[in-house]
Amino acid sequence: MAQTYDAVVVGGGHNGLVAAAYLAKAGKNVVVLERRHVLGGAAVTEEIFPGYRFSVYSYVVSLLRPEIIRELQLPKHGLEILPLDGTITPLDEDYLWRVNDHGKTVREIRRWSKRDAEAYEEYSQLMAQMARFIKPILSAVPPDPGKINLFEWLPLVGLAKEFKDLPRRHQQTFIELMTMSAVDFLDQWFETDPLKATMSASGIIGTFQGPRSPGTAYVLLHHYMGEIDGAFRAWGIPKGGTGGISNAIGSAARALGAEIRTEAPVASIDTKNGRATGVTLENGEQIRADVVLSSVDSHMTFLKLMDPGALDPTFADEVRRYKYRGSSGKVNLALDGLPELACKPGVGEWLRGAVSFSPSVDYMERAYDDAKYGRFSQRPYIDMIFPTLVDPSMAPPGKHIMSCFVQYAPYHLADGQVWDDDMRTAFGENVIDTLEERFPDIRKRIVHKMFITPKDIEDVTGLTEGNIFQGELSLEQLFFNRPVPGWARYETPVKDLWLCGAATHPGGGIMGASGRIAALEVLKANKAGMRNGSKRSKAVA
Amino acid sequence: MATRYDAIVVGGGHNGLVAAAYLAKGRRKVLVVERADRVGGILANVELAEGFTAPGVAHTVGRLRRSVIADLKLEQQGLELLTPEVRVFAPQPDGSGITFWADAAKTADRLRSAFPKAADRYVAFDKRVRALASFLAHVNAATPPDVQTPSIADAITGLKLGKAFKGLGAKAGREATRALPMAVADFIREGVGEEPESDPVAGALAARAVLYTAMGSWAAGSAAVLLNDSAGNDGGIAGQSTFAKGGSGALADALARSATVFGAEIRTGAEVASISTDAGGRATGVVLASGEEISAHAVVTACDPKQTLTRLIDPVVLGPELVWRGGNIRTPGATAKVDLALAGMPKFNGADPDQLQGRIVISLGIDYLEKAADAWKYGRICEDPMLEVTIPTLNDPGLAPDGHHVMSVLFQSAPYDLRDGDWEIEEDRLAEITVKTLERYAPGLGELVVARRVRTPRDLEREVGLTGGHVYHGEPGLDDFFAWRPLLGHARYRFAIPGVFLAGSGAHPGGGVTGGPGANAAREILSDLKRS
């Protein structure tokens, strides 16, 4: 006899866990099913080499919604975020080093350009204001532009009014941020090439776009939206790695009464008469539930876990045309000591933040060009940190780890090549060659190395094409078009099946927003159902 | 002081002339001042060699708004449009070619043997493009709303557009919001198929989306450029290929005659040095380079907005904010023009002469287009350029001596700023690349060339007055669109300071030979003049 729940959540990534916690908080009987032995999906910490623990995939946090931290009392469940201070961009003879201390950063930029130093002040203020304006969108449920439904649009009316009241300069900036390329946007302010390259890098992380691709300016704002302890713009790493976040959310969910099962791979989402009824695990076990929430991406949900033939054919086509295009890989290194930068020798504060391999806009574009034509970048953009400098518990005493986010590594390779072992090695060694140009002694320090390709990300975490955001963050796949036009409100054409992962608005990053909004929408539908006395009343009752 | 005019139009390109004709038709006293010796701007013909007439820049005119033709009685003024049945011929490296006809079903039939999958989807895709383009035609006819203080008129426009949007249906409405910001590569591949064997079809169709821009096929928003190119005309997915008899300059001449018949005055060889203003910061007229002052109630600039803000209006009057914003308008010129005078008809592999009557497009695939844009990015002349070629003499033999032909080529990418080298020297190399590229598909072409003329983006800036050599007056990206073209708060044709109006391609609905900006601007100017 199958076990019955109010709700079953497919996938124990951070969004799945957040959704489960909110449902449990509302008194629902919930179970989360995770395929792997660890919770977290792409936000996991694993001891890859004895004594060395890694945030294997995602590595920093800044967008985790403060309301989630608050409402789920995550600090009580062990969440602690350690600040990362600054970003250094190593160059051949020099470097550009920006830190959280604004005055210090402005002095550093003045070394490069007086004009840019002045612009930086104005720019930072403007961006902080824009971030404040735009933040409510992250908590809004997208309306359907195909329908004129007052209630769906209502939350946006307030925003429209706020927009109308903004000074014209801010209105124009908002539009520029939503439409321009990061470089075109920054060109309006700055002339220093490494500064523009490094700032624009945040616009391309995780996407298959270059810094000159229209639509990348918007992500510049994300840097100003991150809030750790209320401080704008600070990036951080969770104590114990990004798995620390997942574990805290998992612990909160359990405390609220949710059941969480690992090593419980879902084989199928079961339906009857067009209605989701539960799931079947790979071992044949059936779990029944009134609603199914899927935190895996839409490709996996509809085309792998369900029979696409049973879906409306147009909807199935729209799921298929949704673009993934994983573009990044990761290199995790265990070190017996810290390497030194050729351009700034010694071991100092500058290694406590991120080291950004982004010396010029052309460098970034060339990296993108390689990917466009189906090769990994010969000289990739690398966003690198030493987590052990902030959290020594990640490695044995005196030892270090190095986490390198690498772009670009396109999932689809040209000329019939595939991501096999040789290709992975070639990719990883090329990254180390690139690192060696800035850290000449790096090879001597390496004791273990782990290379992760987009194919590995897909194989291990289930993210289609290794896209860390569950789908390309291109303009036509955002907001009311994410993941399918007309189905951006977390509901799906299959009754009682909901999406709650990053494939829905507001998308990727360790934000948790999708999981939270989806859970609240499920609860709302459930309540409305009770009021109407429809069959839906039993949905999660 | 000279006679006071109701309006002075700065620049006698097609939009300036359209605006002037509408204003004159509305019984206003109008003067057009044009720097060059003849009107037309990018339409003006050039004499390539004795007896050879080539279109200066734009070689097709099929985007011209139908209401402009009717309202301004252009046919009575001698405009004759020539519309061949073929739209595009896209020669391929293997000696074959892909032909797109006005009739989508015929195109699909002919595609079938070589591109069965693309052929199956072609008619439906053409229909989809037509539906989206017809919605855009409504948008293009409207004056963008004022975001800060919407008026009742804006509300009515909004309702009309809302109705047009609803007319698309919920499904197509959602599609429109999705299609406009897409990269043309994705948009076209959704239409004709993603499989590699359909790539030559995709490449040929996508070329229009990046022409005159610095965008590649993977640039978000390039789909909007393509859809706009088909808005309000019979383009469909293949795009229009309509010529003016007598060359594109004949359209300019018809516009000028129309304006004159309605009572406008046109002065050529008269360069405007600045827009004059009174103590209150209101425009009062223009000062010519000769020092002559002419006063008017309204100054209508058909020049590009960047030039208007950075050269024509006193920065003190504008204020630092607008000077800064004006300087930031993006005009990344990426297109050069090459005209060839030919001693005979070139023979293209895989084509009969009737297949060459439309546009001949060298764009071998989606990546081919992207690589052309890569060259712009690094400030190089593209060695494997995207070319849009026409042979106007096939439709209009009078443009060259008997048995001779004119070949008009748009070349991309040719960056305004060359990182290495100098345009004075590099323009010859650009002409050589053009001929060499075409010879792959039309062997022996080089031997037919008796004269050639190259216009680099620098030349376009110097000779036609286009800032950065940008033919569209401003990059048609999503950041320069509708209510924020050219700048938010200045998209309603009333521009920068009181008394100045923008009527050129830098205004909504943007570049291309549509007459749309000129006609829309004239409507707003007439309404303002009525009130004053």
Image: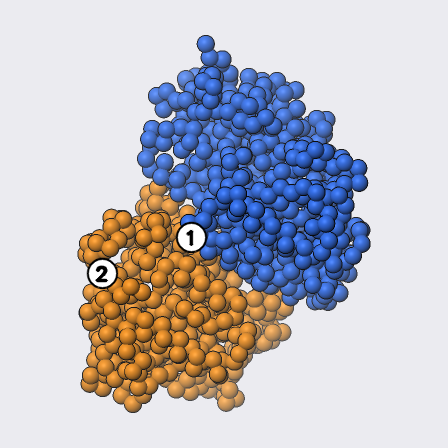
Chain colours: A blue, B orange
Identify the residue at horizontal 49%, vertical 14% (top origin): A4
The quarter holding residue B207 reads: bottom left
Residue under the image location 48 percent in, 38 percent down: A464
Vertical comparison of B181 with A262: above or below: below
Kindly tell me whether residue B283 is visible in this rendering: no
Residue at 31% x, 65% y: name it: B93
Q: Nearer the viewer, residue A285 or B291?
A: A285
Give the Cα distance between marks 2 and 1.
Answer: 36 Å
Which quarter shows the N terminus of chain A? top left
Is B153 left, or right, of A364 in this rendering? Answer: left
Parent chain of label 2? B
Q: Secondary structure at mark 2?
A: loop
Residue that numbered label 1 is attached to: A415
Where residue A293 appears, as percent x and y from the top left, is 49, 26
Query: Residue A407: image x %, image y %?
Result: 57, 50
Chain letter of disc 1 in the image:
A
The tag on residue B169 is: none
Q: Is residue A219 above or below residue B84?
A: above
Query: Badge 1, how many Cα within 10 Å: few under 14, some, many 20+?
Result: few
- Residue indicated by mark 2: B102
Q: Residue B309, how many percent across, how many down? A: 54, 72
Side of B474 relative to A232 (left or right) = left
Please name whichever residue, A141 or B109, is drawn nearer the observer in this view of the structure. Answer: B109
Q: Relative to B161, is A303 above or below?
A: above
